[in-house]
Image: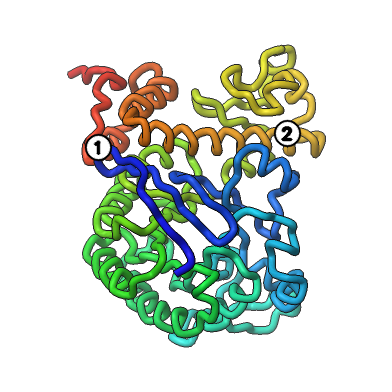
Amino acid sequence: MALRFEVLGKFNRARAARLTLPHFICQTPLFMPVGTQGTIKGLTNSQLQEIGCQIILGNTYHLALRPGPELIDELGGLHKFMNWKRALLTDSGGFQMVSLLHLADITEEGVTFQSPVDGKPMLLTPEESIQIQNKIGADIIMALDDVVKTTITGPRIEEAMYRTLRWIDRCIAAHKRPDVQNLFGIVQGGLDPILRDICVKGLVDRNLPGYAIGGLAGGEDKDSFWRVVAQCTASLPEDKPRYVMGVGYPLDIVVCSALGADMYDCVYPTRTARFGSALVPEGILKLKNQAMADDERPIDPTCSCMVCRNYTRAYLHCLVTKDAMGSQLLSYHNLSYMMRLSKDLHTSIVEGLFPEFVQGFLRTQFPKGDVPEWVCNAMEVAGIDISSCCAPLTS
C-alpha cells in the first residue's frame, strides 16, 4: 500500500484528513480537476499549483489512444511527461467506452468497443486496464468496473455489481506496482441498498488502499444520490479514503463531505467556464448576460485569485465565448473557487467549525431560505442543524 490516510479532525460523519501519496501530501476533502489528455484545458501546471491543486485526474482511455502507454512509460511516466510534480489519479477507461462510443458488448472477459481510429472492435479487459495504468504511473489507479447508468433498473444492475466484484480480483492479480501505485475499488449496485451493501462488503474484504462510490451523478434524483453516498460512507473503513466519482457541483461536495466522503472529480468547473459561467458563493454568475457589459466589479469580491484581482466582469463579458482567453480566465477562477472550497471544508472541520461553515454556505446560496428538501434530509442524517438557514414551512 503506497498511501497513508490520517484523520486530523471530525464532526459527526465529516472528516478532514492528511492523505500522503507517493508524489504529494494532500489535505482532504479535496476536488480533482479532470485533465483528460494529461492537461487541464487552457491552464499551465504552474497555474494549477498556484491555486492549490493537489491531484489531477487523467483519462486512461484518452491517454492510451494518444500518445499511448508505451511512449509515456519510455519517457518516465505521466508525471515526468507532463511535468507535474504533485499527485495523479487515472480512471480505468471503462466509463469513456460506455459514454463516448458505440458500445459493442460487455462480457465476462471485458468491454468490447469500436476503435475510434479504424472502427475495428477492441477489447479492454481488467488486466489490460491495469497494465496501461501501471505504465502511466499515477499515484492512484482505478479498477475496471462494469459501468451502468443509475437510471437503469432490473437484473442488469445486479449483474454489473457482481461482475465488478469478480473483476476487482483480476485487477488485483494484474497490478504489478502496489508499492508505488494505489488501486482503488469502485462500489456499484445502482440505487439498490442491498446490492450496494454486498458490493461494499466484498470490496472491504479485499483490503484495498481506498474506495470509490461509482455509478452516481448520472441523472438519478438527488434524494437517491445522497442516500447512496450516506449508505456507502457509513460502511466503508474509517482509515481509508472515500472518493465519490463524477461529483463537481459545490453544493453536492458540501453535502457529501458532511456525510463522510473525502475526494471528488468532475469536468463541471472547467466546462461551465467554457460556456461563460463563473462559480461564486451565491451560485453561478453568467458573464454572457448583458447586465455584465458595464459592470466594473470582479467576478467575486471575496475571491483573491489572479482573475478577480485583475479583471472586471465587463472585460470578461467581452471575452467569453468569443476569445480563448475568456474560457482560460474563467477556468482559472472556477478551479480556484473549488480549491478554496476544499480548503475551507478541511479547515472548518479541523477547527471544529464545520456546522457554522455549512450554515454560512447555505445562507449565501439560498438567501430566501429555500434550501432543497434533499439537502435538509441529508444534513439531518449528517447531524448538522441547518434550521436557521431554512424558511419556515407555510401551511
Is 14 positioned to the left or the right of 342 in the image?
left
Identify the residue at the far left of this view: 395
User: In the image, 179: left or right of 149?
Assistant: right
Residue under label 2? 329
Q: Percent from the top left, x then y, of residue 67?
A: 76, 70
The crowd level at tag 1 (other Cα within 10 Å; few <14, some 14-19, many 20+) is few
* Type of the residue with mark 1: Asn
- Residue lying at the far bottom of the rendered structure: 109
Query: Which corner quadrant holds the C terminus?
Result: top left
Count residues near mark 2 (Cα–Cα under 10 Å), then give few for <14, some for 14-19, many for 20+.
many
In the picture of the structure, the residue carrying the numbered disc 1 is 377
Question: Quarter-wise, where is residue 354 in the image?
Answer: top left
Which structural element holds mark 2?
helix
Q: Position of residue 31 (x, y in %)?
A: 51, 46
Q: Is residue 114 above or below residue 372?
A: below
Determine if residue 112 is in view: no
Q: In the rendered structure, are the residues bearing label 2 and label 1 in contact, judged by CB atoms less than 8 Å apart?
A: no
Task: Please give the name of the residue rendered at 56% of the width and 77% of the height, measured from the top-left corner.
Answer: 129
Q: Judge whether 307 appears above or below 66 on screen.
A: above
Q: Residue at x 44, y 73 (%)?
A: 146
Left or right: where 243 falls relative to 123: left
Pick the residue in front: 254 or 356.
Answer: 356
Question: Which quadrant of the structure image shows residue 276?
Answer: top right
Q: Label 2 sits on what residue type?
A: Leu
Is residue 28 visible in the rendered image? The answer is yes
Task: Classify mark 1: helix, strand or loop.
Answer: helix
Picture coordinates of residue 176, whole percent (x, y): 54, 81
Closer to viewer: mark 2 or mark 1: 2
